[in-house]
Image (cartoon, helix red, strand yellow):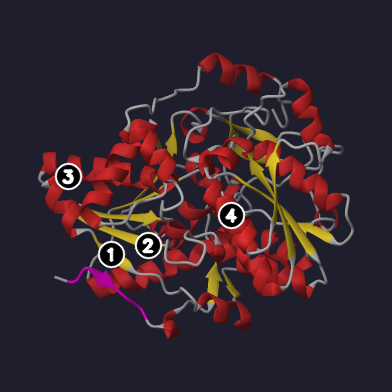
Amino acid sequence: MQRKILLDEKDIPRSWYNIAADMPHLPAPPLHPATLKPVGPDDLSPIFPMSLIEQEMSAERWIAIPEEVLEIYSLWRPTPLFRAYSLEKALGTPARIYYKYEGVSPAGSHKPNTAVPQAYYNRKAGVKRLATETGAGQWGSALAFAGRLMGLDVTVYMVKVSYEQKPYRKMAMQTWGAGIHPSPSARTEAGKKVLAADPESPGSLGIAISEAVEDAATHPDTNYALGSVLNHVLLHQSVIGLEAKKQMEIAGDYPDVILAACGGGSNLGGIAFPFLQDRIKGRDLRVVAVEPTSCPTLTRGEFRYDFGDTAGLTPYLMMYTLGHDFVPPGIHAGGLRYHADSPLVCQLYHDGLIEAKACGQTSVFEAGLLFARTEGIIPAPESAHAIRGAIDEALAAREEKKETVILFNLSGHGNFDMAAYDVYLSGKLVDYEYPSELIREALSKLPRIGG
């Protein structure tokens, strides 16, 4: 009985996989909000280095990983693939459950997979400082870590409700030398506008993105870095799935269903896109995005153009969206509190190549607790969404007496999220399903572009 399937450092992928090369339909292009014309490299150059802009717009299937990035990846990559024997036994299921564990990175999540290359390319372009947003703090921690290694200053706008809920993630960022500000803040015009309308605003990823983009656009030595959503981010995360394919081959198995939490789409794309290459070619495979009922982007949003941020500083992106000024409640899975999703993920969902389901946070924490008590790892609240989805699939397999092969991405540990578990264990955690009328109100403010 082999629990861990490990690869050698020489097995770290040498190239990232770009699913744009194999998609039946590419996402509609980003549009400039002033002209409604497709955005070009010059439009993005004020906040991104040209190397990342080229990756963002590339349709090449494979993009080489720089040697310096590979050297840093080797601090934690390849990450282990586990067979969840103890969880299987607790569920009494004939399903075989595997999970790829990204919590072994220095920052405790999958986020350094893109933070390191983004910092690398920005340093090569002569940038001195990076501005970014973070929800639960996983991305902010990762960029603080990467910025320190690359000699870059990092400024993080952390969603205020998470800033207050998760002090240890804030401390981790400070340990790596980043400056952190609760968002909305009075440092930017975008933040001031939100505070003027609602001084008690809990913040959102959309608001924090607005602040970080404004910061980058108004300082010539500063660029913006994003932890999810954009094509180049999901490209970098493909190392997860590329390793997992090798590990599943060693295990002599292939997944029937792959699950991942979905907020912006980075860990879903990371684990699933290399396998979806097989699905597009005709292999039988399901991919399920698991999102919170309080921020149900794919399951209840509309597929249309919207801003990626609250203040309208980004291009229009074609996404499933709840409306860019949608502010979800302060659930403990702060990394999933985003009004939209990656255009790549949204197009694949629109084309029926992936599925989506929404779960309430009490059932998610119930799943996280069962996982911790069987497999030993305390999962981040975001990652526990994938566990909830995997458990549901395993229970369905038990009912059907079917040996389903389940793979999910355990995108990070919950060691800095213990306050959230304390709320759950004390019986104070409540579910929140966002009212349909508030979603309709947010969507009614969006322009109709292209019909």
Task: Please name the residue shown 81% across and 52% down the image.
Answer: 216
In the picture of the structure, the residue carrying the numbered disc 3 is: 397
Q: CA distance from mark 4 to mark 2?
A: 23 Å
Of the numbered discs in the image, which one, if any, rests on residue 82? 1
In the picture of the structure, the residue carrying the numbered disc 2 is: 101
Of the numbered discs in the image, which one, if any, rests on residue 171? 4
| CB atoms of marks 2 and 1 within 8 Å | yes
Residue closest to the eye, 33 or 65? 65
Q: Secondary structure at mark 3?
A: helix
Q: Quadrant of the C terminus?
A: top right
| Disc on the earlier residue, 2 or 1 | 1
| CB atoms of marks 3 and 2 within 8 Å | no
User: From the viewer's perspective, is the residue at label 3 or at label 2 nearer?
Assistant: 2
Q: CA distance from mark 4 to mark 3?
A: 42 Å
| Disc on the earlier residue, 3 or 1 | 1
Amino acid beneath label 2: Tyr
Q: In the rendering, at what x and y percent does residue 49 appear?
A: 78, 64
